[in-house]
Image (cartoon, rainbow, N blue to C red):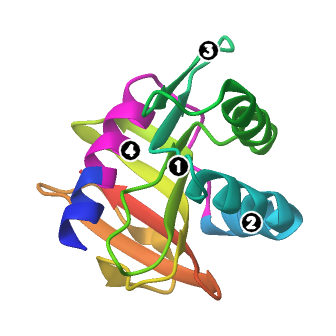
Amino acid sequence: MFRRTLVLVIFGLVASCSAPGPALLTDQQVIELFTTHRSVFVRLVDMATTEPRIGSVDIEEGGTYRVSPGGVPKSKVDQVVTHARELGVHYIGVPPPDGQGRYVQFGVSTRGISLAGTAKSLVYSEGPMAGEAVGNTDDLKPSDGMQIVYRKIADNWYIKTVAN
């Protein structure tokens, strides 16, 4: 599980913080996004975790995107990217199966750069979450080291905030 978290944290921060994004969303804004579009997020989890699996999708401004691994049918990727854009999601990360259930991270908000910034994600996880459980991730401030906190918002759904 640590490996899964570390890989997604690194890829998520590098991908989502490489270009400046909008102001960091509050927990309440992420909850509203999730509540309003829950069925689309559920569909994205199913699409990303069924074979052929999507490892990650970086959605860039200007309409371009990068997907990993190669070999995922373009029609599937296009559907995932279309839904993600509609939701304002700029990154989707799906680690390889590790026996702890499905895990999909949706990058919804970033502030700063990967070396000194904050990234907020909506996460679907059937296994245990890494980091500290908190009542509100908005209170996390960048520090001298990486901090990971999460807030449960529904069964298997969390807001995850990472700050450097």
Q: Which residues are magenta?
A: 8-26
Q: CA distance from mark 2 to mark 1?
A: 15 Å
* Percent coordinates x, y for residue 120 in the rendering: 49, 55
Mark 2 or 4: in front is: 2
Q: Residue at x 47, y 41 (%)?
A: 56
Task: Check the image and report above or below for 78 versus 126.
Answer: above
* Percent coordinates x, y for residue 35 in the rendering: 82, 70
Q: CA distance from mark 3 to mark 4?
A: 17 Å
Please, what secondary structure does the residue beneath circle 4 have? helix
Give the mark nearer the N terminus: 2 vs 4: 4
Q: Residue at x 62, y 17 (%)?
A: 61
Give the mark nearer the N terminus: 4 vs 1: 4
Please, what secondary structure does the residue beneath circle 2 have? helix
Give the mark nearer the N terminus: 1 vs 3: 1
Residue that badge 3 annotates: 64
Residue type at the position of mark 1: Arg
Mark 4 or 1: in front is: 1
- On whether residue 22 falls in the magenta region, the answer is yes
Give the mark nearer the N terminus: 3 vs 4: 4
Task: Check the image and report above or below for 66 versus 35.
Answer: above
Which label sits on residue 53?
A: 1
Which label sits on residue 42?
A: 2
Give the mark nearer the N terminus: 2 vs 1: 2
Residue that badge 4 annotates: 12
Please, what secondary structure does the residue beneath circle 3 have? loop
- On whether residue 113 falls in the magenta region, the answer is no
Residue type at the position of mark 4: Gly
Mark 2 or 1: in front is: 1
Task: Check the image and report above or below for 13 versus 150.
Answer: above
Could you say which is closer to the camera, residue 83 or residue 154? 83
- Residue 87 found in image quarter: top right
Q: Is residue 84 left or right of residue 56?
A: right
